[in-house]
Amino acid sequence: MKYEPVYYSEYLQLDKILNSQHLKSQEYGTEAHDETLFIIIHQTYELWFKQIIHELNSVYKIFDHERVLPNTLGTINQRLSRIVEIQRILNDQLTVIETMTPLDFMDFRDYLVPASGFQSIQFRTIELKLGLRQKFRLGVDKEFFNSRLKAHDKEHLQALENEPTLLELIDKWLARMPFAQTEDYDFWQEYQIKINQILDEDQTIIQENKTLNAKEKEFELKNLEATRANYANLFDAQKYAKLQAGGLARFSREAKLAAIFIRLFRDEPILQIPNKLLDLLIDIDEMFTTWRYRHAIMVQRMLGTKIGTGGSSGHEYLKKSTDNNRVFIDLFNLATFLLPKSHIPSLPASVRKELGFSYEV
Ligand code: HEM
């Protein structure tokens, strides 16, 4: 035989995995029945985190180039889809830990201080690799979790801060996308004309609406002005830079425009895979946000308003971070800038022809 025979448990190194549940309750006194579940569920999460990082690293390798070849996008989408499926399991798994009651948890909780999910380096690695840099985190988060990490873990995360994030790689890739502007054609000019037309029509409809009283009209016109301002921000580099500085936009203006273009012309052959990629990034962000929210709710059920073993305000902190720690907010907000299909300016034949074939950016 060419290869050595393999034995199931040795190949999977089950002796290590299955002998890695050491109960603190047993060490200090009486075994708490649910501590085994508590350890195993965290270990399971960490294994899946490892797989997610493995997938993200491979996507990084493909993206971390000056050019992304079109025939690699399928692989990227396949790996990102895998992450989404793993996340689905991670979200569902919370119901298993919820079979533990707060009273059962109290049998061993005090032994765990100051350890906490705060110290999950793989979780932080995923967050960071996706795009959640320190500067985007909540204050409490930075202070607490940095002060509670061992030096080598701090160094690992600090080193990651110096690497580009997926958000930044996607940004660069989008910003390089051709099609919207050619030598003799500028899609964005046509788009702005259309938008102004639609907004002017909306304004007339509000002004001439006899069912609205003066106050209601004023209110609706104010909302319309806010919509106009949103578009103005997109087409004015200085205004857009202000949004970025205030954390309201993470993508560059060029990337945002390219993403809108992909959304508007998603049915063109060349844009179908990029469009799917944008959907997957939204899925990943949504799945993590769902996890954060469900974890926060589970924590409230388990601890009420008690502080966490890691020292944060517990449920309150987790609820805030659910809202704050989003990564691809720009992609969620793309819908703001879409037009009804009937109003999308048509593309010149030369551009349509290119969208039917392959390209490299
Ligand atoms: C009884 C079950 C659990 C309780 C009571 C609990 C409680 C908490 C609390 C209070 C925090 C905030 C930090 C702190 O002050 O400690 C936290 C953070 C965290 N927990 Fe849990 N947790 C539980 C289960 C899990 C499980 C199963 C995982 C899976 C890996 C997990 C992963 C995390 C992560 C990654 C954080 C950091 C979140 C962030 O900073 O955004 N937790 N947990």
Image (spheres, rainbow, N blue to C red):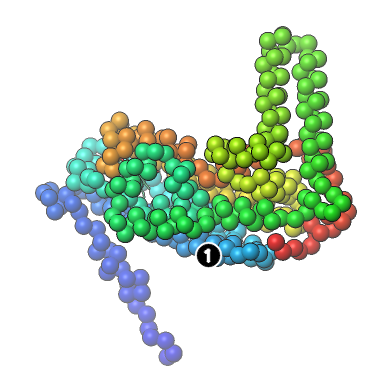
160 shown above or below 208: below
Disc 1 Cβ-to-ligand 1 distance below 8 Å: no
Q: Quadrant of the C terminus?
A: bottom right
Residue ID for mark 1: 58
Q: Which amino acid, mark 1?
A: Ser
Q: Would you say residue 173 is visible in this rendering?
A: yes
Ligand 1 falls in quadrant = top left
- The local secondary structure at tag 1 comes to helix
Name the residue located 57 percent from the left edge and 44 percent from the top edge: 250
Q: Position of residue 8 (x, y in %)?
A: 35, 74
Task: Tell me: residue 193, above or below residue 18.
Answer: above
The residue lying furthest to the left in this view is: 29
Which residue is drawn at the image coordinates 40% and 48% (left, top)?
93
* Towards the viewer: 290 or 270: 270
Label tally: 1
Question: What residue is drawn where x is 52% and y is 45%?
Answer: 327
Q: In the picture, which quadrant includes the N terminus?
A: bottom left
Going by the image, does 49 lie left or right of 174? Answer: left
Residue furthest front in the image: 238
Q: Position of residue 292 (x, y in %)?
A: 43, 42
55 and 301: which is toward the camera: 55
Depth check, front residue: 125 or 80: 125
Residue 334's spot in the image, x, y percent?
A: 65, 41
Residue 72, quarter of picture: bottom right
